[in-house]
Amino acid sequence: MDIDEERVEIFKKHRARLFGIAYRMLGTHAEAEDIVQETYIKWHEAEIEKIENAEAWLVTITTRLSIDRLRKASKTRETYIGPWLPEPLVVSEKPSPEEELELASNLSMAFMFLLERLSPVERAAFLLHDIFDCGYADVARIVGKTETASRQLIHRARERVRTDKTRFEADEKEREKLIKKFAAASVTGDEKTLFELFSDEIVSVSDGGGKVTAARKIIRDKAKLVRALGMFGKKYGESFKNLLYTINGELGVLTFIEGKIYSATTFEFENGKISAIYRVMNPEKLKQITN
């Protein structure tokens, strides 16, 4: 095997991990792929015989590129219309080993939404340590901080993304049952069933990006949410097609209208009820999803 073939094989071995870092940092598939490609170019330009640990080098480059990209993206997101949710990550029904690796750690919409509270460096330090199992010394080296400062960053990040909610740890069948009920009720506009499905502390986050009609603020009023979903279902439900599918590693609902993707929805549960809804409706974030 010559040096170029060796470079390719080493990169392929770590590619899924690099994509996983970049996606969790940036929240979009396209930008994550851009970062992975940039890392690949730098890897081909590097003197690999001088690199002691290829994985550490690749992770470092990917993370630093992601931090720089997120700093620029953060300015754009400040003027984003309505709540910002990540681009849904939808893989095949039978994921390849690489796709399984991408989904190996938490990347739910709920988790990704909480990560938006963090600065780019906080986000990187937190993800590297808590999700990708990097030691404090490695995190410090990658983000360019002292080990003490990195520990403080990670601790602060945990505090900022911590939620006091107790997740409803039902089995897959129970979650599927609740989601199926929601999917059916939202199509028919069945307000009674929706009201029964939702927790009293229901939170609904919709991302339309100003490109489609969507709530521009987080809805925390159960009755208001039920009315809105009920009216929409009664008016347009006959043209809906809801498909249960794995979105960001969790069971969710893809909604199609006249064969065209309309939304990707995921959920949180608490005490046998739906406690949160995350719905991506911005067509720019749904381009990769087909019926």
Image: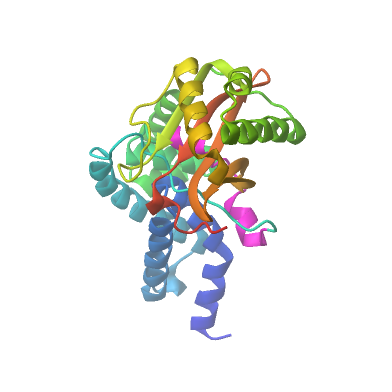
Quarter location, residue 195? top right
How many marks can you see?
0
Left or right? Give the position of 289 relative to 180.
Answer: left
Q: Quadrant of the N terminus?
A: bottom right
- Residue 151: give x, y in percent of width and height: 43, 32
Say which residue appears at 36% left-offset and 52% top-offset: 66
- Residue 159: give x, y in percent of width and height: 44, 23
- In magenta segment, residue 66: no
Q: Quadrant of the C terminus?
A: bottom right
The range drawn in magenta is 95-114
- In magenta segment, residue 107: yes
Say which residue appears at 55% left-offset and 62% top-offset: 14
Give the answer, above or below, for where 79 lies relative to 103. above
Say which residue appears at 48% left-offset and 35% top-offset: 235
Residue 262 makes an appearance in the image: yes
Residue sitting at the far top: 200
